[in-house]
Amino acid sequence: MNPLAQLREECQKLLEESLEKAYPETELPQAKYSEPPNPEMGALSSPVCFQLARPLRQSPVKIAQTLAKNIDTSSSTLIVSVEAVNGYLNFHTDIGNYASLVLKTVRAKDKEYGFLKSANPEKVMVEHTSANPISPLHIGNARNSILGDSLARLLDKRGHDVIRHFLVNDMGRQVAMTTYGWKLLGKPEPVGTAELWIGTIYASVNVINEIQRYTKDLREAEKEGWVYEAQEAQEELEKFNIAADGLRKRYADIYEKLSEIIPGIEDPTAEIVALNTAYENNDPTTVNEVRQQVKYCLDGFEKSLGDLDISFDSFDYESDLVWRQAAEEVLEALKKSGYVIKDQGAQILDCDWVARDFKLKERWGLHPKHEIPRLVLVRGDGTTLYTLRDMAYSIWKFSHAERVINVIGQEQTLAQLQLRIALAAIDKIEMGDNQRHYAYEFVNLPGIKMSGRLGRYVTLNEVLERAVALAYGEVEKRTSELSDEEKQNIAEMVGYGAVKYTLISVDPMKQVTFDWEKALNFETNSAPFIQYSHARTCNILKRVDETTEADYSQLTHIKERDLVNLLARFPETFVDAVEELQPADLTAYANNLADKFNSFYATQNVLKAETPELMAARLAIVDAVRITLRNALDVLGIKAPERM
RNA sequence: GCGGUCGUAGCUCAGUGGAUAGAGCACGGGUCUUCGGAACCCGGGGUCGCGGGUUCGAAUCCUGCCGACCGCGCCA
């Protein structure tokens, strides 16, 4: 299953024998094997001589030469020679044997190639997306969904039992505001894309309220002759008026109607708060209304994400009564812990104290000077805060899983840390250990900031539509004989793949600026490029029936060796990507493999190979590349069409 | 003020202790009677934010500055 590991074992054996001969009594230090800078220098390389330099009191270069001289490769099937270069030991493979091992392994394992299973499979819950059900998913949410889903896929392939979870934030003021607007409109059915329609209601209510407020401020300031205040109000008004124009353009009647109704209401804010309270108190009519509105949005989310092949095993509503009860229990436990202090009637958790007592900073790798701010649990008026519900929710997660990964924006870092600390305070320190905040940064738009409150965003749907349309145009140029449906199918695989790839391939902690050109770039270093390479492999394979026995020792060209080496690296790349939770490792790998394959393709003609045995061997490479590219894309949730 | 994250080519980004720091875009030049050019090859372009330290070896680890963003609510 892992040919690279076999190769490494043989290297290790040779090294040990050589060291025993050349420097008896010396232990072989633990050293990682690395990849030489270029394939001509061998398949594997060891820097072990640098570590031996001190104990042996010799230069690494000298040691490497001595060890190389003492290595006898006759006992090894995979290694044909070892070279000392600048203190490194470079291992050269017997291409016939190594290619045979690698290519046969890949082809025998086929769909399972690379997916080494964990020795300790766990139940893992991945919570991702969890977007507020009041606006369409935008390109920033999509980063969350796509990263979360790729993590879930990676863990699943590694043999873990994965639960994909969505938390519905239905308790906030924003949901109440949206439902309020929807009621004012007479509870109509959504028109067009439901989430966008809902998002327009939400933003309209908000914008209208703000315009009223600043209009009032402006009048007062003018009356009193406050120049500075007047100017400030004027600027705010302009901002909201621009937003209003955008909303009108999207759904003229929503904004118009609401802007006729709302100014006639004495205190809309009070009514929104009242609606929120009624919902919290489980008033049956309100529950129906809110849930209906939320459902419109969630159905839309499921559809957009479904297009991307992203789905959930469970949706849970924050409003479910269980949490409130569980939150009470958590509060009791926290009080008993003794870490809760009182301040003007409020109850507050002293996080830093907990961290000190349980040595959490050492345990979780935080800086010793990192002071953790205190956390308010209960207000002075006795009402509880969200944190308690979040804790209860966290505890609930662990009744379904041993490990929890929360894909949540980077701005929640402190809140997530406080949550883990609070869990430690009530004797659930292992829940803190096994809970990981998988943080990611914003996606910005060039020039402006996205804002749900102003209804200003690039929606996921828009991006997907444009990507698929562009892909369709390209597909049409090349596969005119296919039916429209087939072309559409391929265009979707390509367009969706392109969007996923751009979001997966950059470090989650890097702020990115959304760039249409880059998202729709179908050239090298994109999903379509990898998919295209895959289609090329399929195309070659389609043209032949392999009958001749391959002679792998004829794969003497450096590009062929390079591909064999790279193919052998896939299983460990996969394992590293899962263990480090870095799906980007796999986009980089797949791009690299596609790149090397195209380079091979340009000069090493497969079907016109010099001998039938060489052709068979090259076909084996092509087939192995096909399998590996497909598997790498598959584990990222990107499909690989056979033609495009 | 305190804490976190980021800073690598003109632009967008890889590279989490190893050899000469790599891709794509953009720019300049080439390949093609093709196993599908969404391709391949060559080229220019870098004091890895700045300074110190650890190490045989640092873009990578530690530390001090500088800059950008985000947190530090009796909001959710």
Image (cartoon, coloured by chain):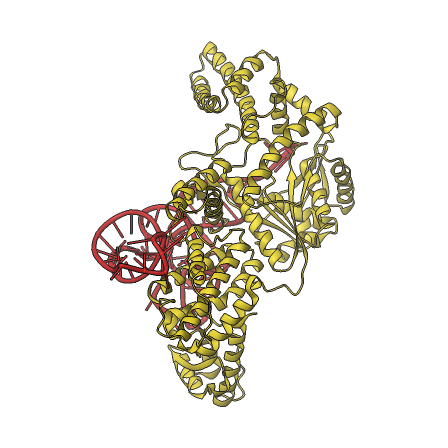
Chain colours: A yellow, B red
Instruction: Tell me residue A496's x, y (percent).
Output: 49, 45
Using the image as rendered, state which of residue A368 and residue A523 is in the foreground.
Answer: A523
Residue A225, quarter of the rendered image: top left
| Number of numbered labels in the structure image | 0
Using the image as rendered, state which of residue A238 and residue A372 is in the foreground.
Answer: A238
Using the image as rendered, state which of residue A222 and residue A480 is in the foreground.
Answer: A480
| Left or right side of A369 for A281 | right
Q: Is residue A596 above or below residue A19?
A: above
Which quarter of the image is occupied by the N terminus of chain A?
A: bottom right
| Left or right side of A374 for A591 | left
Q: Is residue A287 above or below residue A304?
A: above
Can residue A46 be seen here? The reply is no
Can residue A263 be seen here? The reply is yes
Instruction: Tell me residue A397's x, y (percent).
Output: 70, 47
Q: Is residue A381 above or below residue A67?
A: above
Q: Is residue A241 above or below residue A403?
A: above
Instruction: Tell me residue A175's x, y (percent).
Output: 62, 29
Instruction: Tell me residue A300's x, y (percent).
Output: 58, 35
Residue B72, quarter of the rendered image: top right
Q: Residue at 38% across / 68% down in the picture?
A: A559
Using the image as rendered, state which of residue A216 and residue A259 is in the foreground.
Answer: A259
Q: Residue at 53% across / 53% down in the picture?
A: A636
